[in-house]
Amino acid sequence: MNTPISIHDKKSFIQWFLNHYQLKKRESVWILNYLVNHKELLANVHFVLDVKFSPRGIVMTTHCSDEVPFRFYKNQLVTTDAEKSFHDIRLNQQDDLYIQLNFRNSNQNAYYASVMEENPFIPDDYFITKKEKDFAKQILDKTVFDYKRNTLRKEIDQALDDMNQEKFIALSNQLHMLEKGFFIQPKLQKQ
């Protein structure tokens, strides 16, 4: 669960950001200044990654970044018109507003990280490709196999030490079936 970010912290961050970075679109500055001066709006502002998944969000970019200068997302609509987005912000002050700021080394900026929140609208599998999922499953299967095989080998060794022929045969058969089942599956592939 996310710890709520205080209005004061958001306001301080925006002021710091405006003093340290120049945005590609001047309307972005107007919007941020408007937010700073309206506490009720600032309470509903959330700084997140990948704002395109949120129901209402803005992407703002500084001159030091190659990203798009400005995008406003509302439901499935996208606009680059900052005035329309400003109008929407003024009319829907009680609605959550998600903001993504693109600037150099933003992922390493401690101040930005202090106001960042997890975006609840990002799909669960957004950061993982099918190839990565398959590889992770292969590693997990191999790890489970190795654990079971090592456990059976120890039990077989113990059965030999105890001279328990029945247990030795049963465990040996289990080991044989485990290895046969594992090696029939596709082998772990190198990346």
Image (cartoon, rainbow, N blue to C red):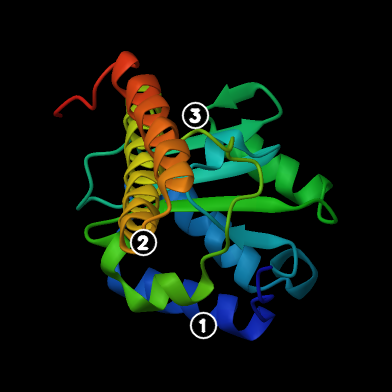
Identify which residue is drawn at 31% across, 71% down: 109
Instruction: Give above or below for 42 relative to 78.
Output: below
Location of residue 94 in the rendering, given as x and y in whole percent from the top left corner: 85, 56
Identify which residue is drawn at 43% across, 53% down: 164
Instruction: Give above or below for 60 relative to 107.
Output: above
Q: Which residue is mark 3?
A: 80
**Mark 2 secondary-structure assignment:** helix
Closer to the eye: label 2 or 3 = 2
Whether residue 70 sits left or right of residue 92 in the image: it is left
Q: Which residue is mark 2?
A: 158
Location of residue 90 in the rendering, given as x and y in whole percent from the top left corner: 76, 50
Q: Amino acid at mark 3?
A: Thr
User: The C terminus appears in which quarter of the rendering?
Assistant: top left
Q: Amino acid at mark 2?
A: Gln
Whether residue 72 sits left or right of residue 114 in the image: it is right
Q: Which mark is residue 163?
A: none
Q: State the CA–CA distance, disc 2 to disc 1.
A: 66 Å
Q: Could you say which is closer to the camera, residue 26 or residue 126?
A: 126
Q: State the CA–CA distance, disc 1 to disc 3.
A: 27 Å
Judge the density around disc 2: few (<14), some (14-19), many (≥20) Cα neighbours within 10 Å.
some
